[in-house]
Amino acid sequence: MAAEPILVRTFSDLITDFNRRSVAYALAGGWAYSALVEPRSTTDIDLLILLDPPSREQIQALVSSLFDSTIIHPNPMALQGISIWRIVGIRSGQEVVIDFLLADSAYLRTALERRHTVPFGALQVPMLSIEDLVILKMVAGRLQDRADLEKIRTRQTDVR
């Protein structure tokens, strides 16, 4: 049997650890799309997370046990008004990228409150609602986000 990919192992360990520690988060991005719409590949892990106040030290404390070493960007990036703090973790000699979308606006805190838990394999994963996933993908507007939105629209039409 082939070894489980490093991204999948990291995802599982991260979700397990955050659930154990009662971290306020919701799965976003490609993993959420895969759970809510249809499976697709992704190269990172995106989480909407409440950190009050957010700091590199707090992020380091959240992820350090998962990696051999980490590179945490000095400050969050801003993408269309959303603050994203990127972490690059090294695990078994491989890079894993985690993006924390900071719940630092009224809308994002409300989106976090609307999260619901979805079984994802053996895990129970807090997940953005499909409506909030659509809004975040519309805001981001990257090519993959636009493709995801088109597939969501197609599936909604098929359901009707």
Image (cartoon, rainbow, N blue to C red):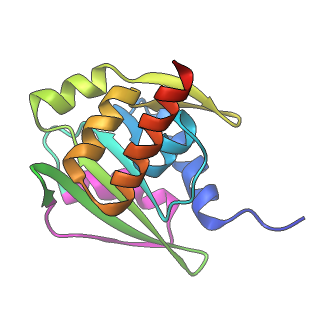
- Residue at the (42%, 60%) spot, across then down: 64
Q: Residue at x 9, y 49 (%)?
A: 81
Q: In front: 72, or 141?
A: 141
Q: Is residue 145 visible?
A: yes
Q: Residue at x 38, y 24 (%)?
A: 115
Q: Is residue 18 visible?
A: no
Along the line of sight, the residue nearer the viewer: 160 or 124 = 160
**Rendering coords of residue 73 (x, y %):** 22, 70
77 above or below 33? below
**Residue 6, located in which quarter of the rendered image?**
bottom right
108 on left or right of 12: left
Q: Residue at x 47, y 43 (%)?
A: 151
Q: Nearer the viewer, residue 75 or 31?
A: 31
Q: Is residue 129 above or below residue 96?
A: above
Q: How many marks?
A: 0
Q: Is residue 57 left or right of residue 89?
A: left
